[in-house]
Amino acid sequence: MERWRSRDPRLSQFYGLCRSGKLRHRRSRVRPLLIGGATTSKVHTAVKINPSYARGQTVYVTDASRAVGVASSLLSKEGGARYAADIRAEYEKMATTHANKQSSGKRLTIEQARANRAQPDFTKTPGAPSFLGTRVYDNYDLAELAKYIDWQPFFQTWELAGPFPAILEDEKVGKAASDLYRDAQAMLKKIIDEKWLTARAVVGFWPVNRSPDNADDIVVYGDKARKFPIHTLHTLRQQMAREKDRPNLALSDFIAPRGTEDYIGGFAVTAGIGEEKHIQAFKDAKDDYNAILLSALADRLAEAFAEAMHEKVRKELWGYAATENLSNDELIKEAYSGIRPAPGYPAQPEHSEKATLFKLLDAQAKIGIKLTESYAMWPGSSVSGFYYAHPESRYFGVGKIERDQVADYAKRKGWDMATAERWLAPLLNYNPRTVDAA
């Protein structure tokens, strides 16, 4: 919460309420939950979060500066109860509408979806990388990484929407965007010249094949002969009914079966070493603006690092696109061969697979990135994922999944159903409580 404070005095008021405990109901231990940000939405809050939070009313807040107004409404002696009741009724209606919409679409069983999996041409599978195992890059040149920055998400962090660099000339937000960009460039120069941040990366490659036991699993081997499996990667598959000639995708589709030589890559990068110290110095000086600016720039450098390392992988370390010559705009548009999907994102939206990636990379020991209990990375300005090199590999969204796939996934992961449903909660196309009660 502290990380996203701005100059808005209303936010200082809101944080004061949080710290003092006054957001608790005066006569009970009720605690409202205010939630927002890029990883959720009003519908997601209504469908998934609100029904699961029993200690008070959940409210989706579109912008942090509006939090104090929502908090004040919830605390109001005169209208607080009515405000919470109105929010609750709205969310219940949204949840019902969402459930009706989801149930109306035709769905496939997991076996039907697997039967309709993608069938890439594995004669086009790239050859072996230049090494197997891991390689560490320490004190990576920040000036080099700055060349790979995608500035558009930077402005979105500040609620300034528009394509870069056109946003700098925008009729409505151009002045604010230009001032922010000038400040960002000045701080970026200090970050580079004074070495505020340290950038580290670990990259690895391993022999793999699609599992002969389950088409949605990928077996990772410790040897090129593929005699010694060391880990299994578990993927999820689309279950919506597709139009003719459109497959139900899983990431395992882009990995060759036994008998064909294939490999997978993995990476973890951070530009956040040193970030916490400098952000704290700004906070101690009551300079929230520059604290947020530094955080946003560290995030951009981490994403730039991921882009730079992927290019290095394609052109050198794996070398399957050695002659590639793309501009930064083309890199941002992903006009290259291969993908780098990450656990927790649409193509593999289950976070615990990140633990397997970190074991393969030994990321904590090698470059100091830790995983929290919820599989978030620390330092926060870090990025990780896998490298898939097959030329037909592409990004997609798994979408909602059915109970049969959840049961199958639980068995593959060695989980019980309750654990699987907890980790897969945002993806479930059914209500576990309703199913269990039936």
Image (tube, rainbow, N blue to C red):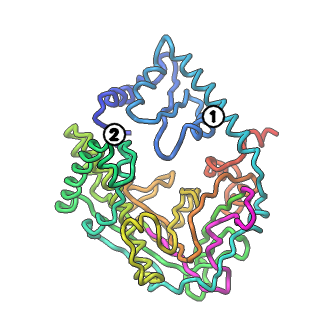
Q: Residue furthest right?
A: 438
Please, what secondary structure does the residue beneath circle 1 have?
A: helix
Q: Main secondary structure of the magenta part?
A: loop
- Residue at 26% x, 65% y is 142
* Residue identified by numbered label 2: 172
Earlier-in-chain disc, 1 versus 2: 1
Up-down relation of residue 196 to residue 392 (above or below): above
* Residue identified by numbered label 1: 51
- Residue at 66% x, 35% y is 95
Q: Is residue 431 left or right of residue 339?
A: right
Up-down relation of residue 274 to residue 321 (above or below): above
**Residue 42 locus on image (x, y percent):** 55, 37
Residue 406 position by quadrant: bottom right
Q: Is residue 361 left or right of residue 251?
A: left
Are there few (<14), some (14-19), or many (20+) residues within 10 Å of tag 1? some
- Residue at 75% x, 67% y is 116
The answer to whether residue 330 of the structure is visible from this angle is: yes
Q: Residue furthest front?
A: 171
In the image, residue 244 lies in the stretch drawn in magenta? yes
Q: Amino acid at mark 2?
A: Lys
In the image, residue 285 lies in the stretch drawn in magenta? no
**Residue 82 locus on image (x, y percent):** 56, 16
